[in-house]
Image (cartoon, grey):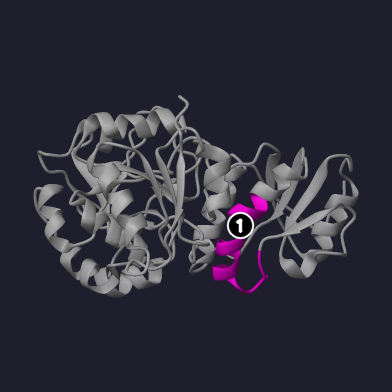
């Protein structure tokens, strides 16, 4: 695959009308368009065109049993995607849309199998970034759009990340500036007896519970899902978000973490740490955000993982973040980048 990829900049849907119109036309024509959203950049195609969507899988090297999220600009577009709205869906939409929330809903007849990995459900969200919604609205079609990266790699939060991974594989890349959230959307399933959190994000479990009262947390949020098991949300199986280096999470105090690093092989070893830790460790360190600021950690995580690749890291030991609120989303991305390898430190030194 070697496509002449165009790159345009669009920060404002009114001022940058030409870029919005170009992206919309290409989507209607069955082409691949990388578009910015508030979460991460996505590689988009007409969600109702199975051939166009198939090209997403080819460009990313994405497994076919990994479902996609269909993005909409208006509530009316739900009619093209779903067969009905379960209890709570409208309430969630009124509270969190447009925004970083994806709902798994009963799939409509017009949705191709390739979008939903053959499942009877479809994942849908309405992004809040004005440029993204303007492109989708003008295209006139829902847009299937997973993260615009090579499958398994850290997700893209800048246009440079998208160019690194997908230049020559897509028809257009729309530069919308840095992604303000920095991790993918929260995914909640409304199909079943009780609502179920499948992937944490900027809409937290507590926020969901305020609207729906009782929300279960799927075990796949923090544990490995068997590669052969069907899943209804992206990011629930396979190794995700990973740099080339081997990543291990390390859970412990500052003193324990430093002592742990002292005992490790130093060549090619880096630490992925809270910003406050930099400068006081026996190996080179990369910060991914302040210790007490989970939102900043989310914005900085994927860029930090990509930077470690640029530095030639071979082994990365990462500080385990707080798992409350937005921190659960950061932990979810990190533990998957580590292939669920995590060490819990004690005061004992072997």
Q: Nearer the viewer, residue 238 or 58?
A: 58
Outermost residue toward the top? 1
Going 45% across and 52% down the picture, which residue do you hit? 8
Please identify the quadrant where the N terminus is shown: top left
Residue 153 visible, this orientation: no
Q: Toward which corner of the image does residue 245 lie, by quadrant? A: top right
What secondary structure predominates along the stretch shown in magenta?
helix
Vertical relation: 78 (above or below) 145: below
User: Residue 348's spot in the image, x, y percent?
Assistant: 84, 54
Say how many tags the image has.
1
The reply to whether the magenta stretch includes residue 295 is: yes
Vertical arrangement, residue 273 with respect to residue 308, above or below: below
Circle 1 residue: 301
Query: In this rendering, does residue 5 appear at all?
Result: yes
Residue 117 point in image, percent of width and height: 28, 33
Measured from the top left, where is residue 264 in percent x and y?
86, 44
Determine the secondary structure under disc 1: helix
Residue 89 or residue 173, whichever sits in front: 173
x then y, percent, for residue 270? 79, 48
Label 1 environment density (alpha carbons within 10 Å; few <14, some 14–19, many ≥20): many
Horizontal side, residue 176 vs residue 48: left or right: right
Q: Residue at x 50, y 49 (%)?
A: 222
Give the magenta part as a residue range: 289-305
Name the residue located 67 percent from the left edge and 61 percent from the top edge.
288
Determine the residue positioned at 26% across, 46% down.
Answer: 25
58 or 338, nearer to the observer: 58
Q: Is residue 31 magenta?
A: no
Res 130 → quadrant: bottom left
Q: In this rendering, is residue 220 above or below 130?
A: above
Residue 103: quadrant of the picture: bottom left
Outermost residue toward the front? 18
């Amino acid at each position: 695959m070697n496509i002449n990829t165009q790159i345009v900049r669009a920060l404002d849907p009114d001022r940058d009308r030409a870029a919005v119109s170009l992206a919309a036309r290409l989507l209607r024509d069955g082409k691949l368009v990388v578009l910015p959203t508030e979460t991460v950049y996505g590689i988009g195609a007409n969600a109702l065109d199975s051939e166009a969507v198939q090209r997403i899988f080819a460009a990313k090297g994405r497994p076919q049993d990994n479902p996609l999220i269909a993005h909409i600009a208006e509530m009316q577009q739900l009619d093209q995607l779903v067969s009905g709205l379960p209890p709570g869906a409208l309430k969630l939409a009124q509270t969190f849309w447009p925004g970083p929330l994806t709902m798994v809903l009963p799939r409509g007849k017009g949705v191709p199998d390739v979008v939903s990995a053959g499942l009877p459900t479809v994942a849908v969200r309405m992004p809040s970034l004005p440029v993204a919604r303007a492109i989708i609205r003008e295209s006139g079609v829902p847009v299937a759009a997973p993260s615009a990266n090579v499958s398994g790699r850290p997700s893209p939060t800048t246009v440079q990340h998208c160019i690194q991974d997908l230049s020559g594989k897509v028809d257009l890349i729309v530069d919308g500036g840095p992604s303000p959230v920095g991790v993918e959307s929260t995914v909640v399933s409304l199909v079943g007896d009780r609502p179920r959190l499948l992937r944490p994000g900027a809409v937290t479990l507590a926020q969901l519970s305020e609207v729906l009262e009782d929300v279960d947390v799927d075990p796949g949020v923090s544990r490995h899902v068997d590669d052969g098991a069907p899943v209804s949300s992206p990011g629930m199986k396979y190794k995700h978000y990973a740099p080339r280096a081997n990543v291990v999470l390390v859970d412990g105090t500052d003193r324990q973490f430093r002592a742990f690093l002292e005992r490790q092989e130093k060549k090619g070893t880096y630490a992925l740490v809270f910003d406050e830790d930099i400068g006081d460790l026996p190996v080179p360190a990369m910060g991914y955000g302040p210790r007490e600021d989970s939102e900043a950690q989310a914005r900085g995580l994927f860029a930090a993982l990509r930077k470690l690749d640029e530095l030639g890291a071979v082994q990365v030991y990462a500080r385990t973040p707080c798992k409350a609120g937005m921190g659960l989303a950061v932990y979810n991305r990190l533990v998957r980048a580590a292939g669920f390898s995590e060490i819990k430190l004690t005061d004992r030194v072997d």
